[in-house]
Amino acid sequence: MEPKYFEILDDEVVAFIEKTEHHYPADSTNASIAEQRQFYDDLCRAFEGPLPSNVTKTDRWITSGKAVIGVRDYKTDKPSSHAHVIYIHGGGFVVGSLESHDSICAEFCAKTGLSITSVDYRLSPEHEHPTAYNDCLNTFRFVEAETDLPIILAGDSAGGTLAAAVANAVGGSGGKLIGQLLIYPALGGAEHSGSRIEHENAPMLTVADMDFYEQIRGGGRDLSLDATATPLAADEFTRLPPTVIITAECDPLAGDGKRYRDSIVASGGKAVWFNEAGLVHGYLRARHMSEQAKASFNRMIQALNMLSKESWDF
């Protein structure tokens, strides 16, 4: 870790990074895809907590074109009647699953009362873009058809990318989408500028890591002008619902949040961006060992509650 980060990050966040690196080697991109998935699964298990007592979860299958996609539904004993959340997990489009973000979804459900559907979209390199996007879009359409509630799209990292891409596709269709919560998403920020220079070698995520996973996702194709892969490549942003973007200060993706917020606001929409000081990419897993991560997690809960009630007090 570069010396400057010891000045920016507190002891709790440094401890989180060290625990993460114990389970997920810094040079993991040199490992096979199967090994990377095993590293990630081990990492996520290390941070898992018990299922909240007021939450039940159910696995099921839905159709996505000719494919069948797994989803996991979370519900409290007294579910909110305001909205339904579709949550899309992170993992660079290469790793991650229903299990990797199980406790995150369960805790969001427990603390908001909102029912949640988590999407087990297909991963690269076995399934290059646009497979993951199509799986998430088709899941949205499926949930939209079966629920009477409005829908919030949410996701972290690659999941935030997918959520924003789906929101762009469905936001102006007269459907049920009422908001989106994007957590340190990759949206297509300007290369070789801003946070991508300042935090090129940040702990937890480097620009080299991002380039590696993007190559796998696209099979070597340039996806920078494809709005289904790169949300900031969209022609316009008037279709989007009220949006909350939350990024980490020490993350090359931080600037994406600002550019996305500015694009939505310039188009007359509602968007707010929080760049959380002293935090790093992936800090959702640190919410029970870092006060700063806990405070940001509470901000996410507040955002979901406000979006679900279609209020805007930011």
Image: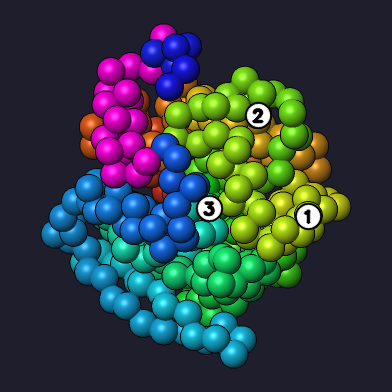
For residue 263, above or below residue 3 = below
Which mark identifies residue 211? Answer: none
Residue found at the far right of this picture: 235
Residue located beneath label 2 in the image: 196
Which residues fall within the magenta stretch?
A: 7-25
Residue 99 in sight here: yes
The residues bearing labels 1 and 2 have C-alpha atoms spaced at a distance of: 18 Å
Q: Secondary structure at mark 3?
A: loop
Q: Is residue 230 magenta?
A: no
- Front residue of 158 and 170: 158
Side of 7 where 311 appears, left or right: right
Residue 113 in sight here: no
Q: What colour scheme does the image use?
A: rainbow
The amino acid sitting under disc 3 is Gly
Which mark identifies residue 92? Answer: 3
The residues bearing labels 1 and 3 have C-alpha atoms spaced at a distance of: 16 Å
Q: Residue 309 in the image: x percent, y percent? A: 48, 52
Side of 207 where 53 appears, left or right: left
Q: Residues within 10 Å of mark 1 (few under 14, many from 20)?
A: few
The amino acid sitting under disc 2 is Arg
Q: Secondary structure at mark 1?
A: loop
Side of 139 where 269 appears, left or right: right
Which mark identifies residue 222? Answer: 1
Q: Residue 59 in the image: x percent, y percent? A: 32, 78
Q: Secondary structure at mark 2?
A: helix
Q: Residue at x 56, y 42 (%)?
A: 209
Which tag, 3 or 2, sits closer to the chain's start?
3
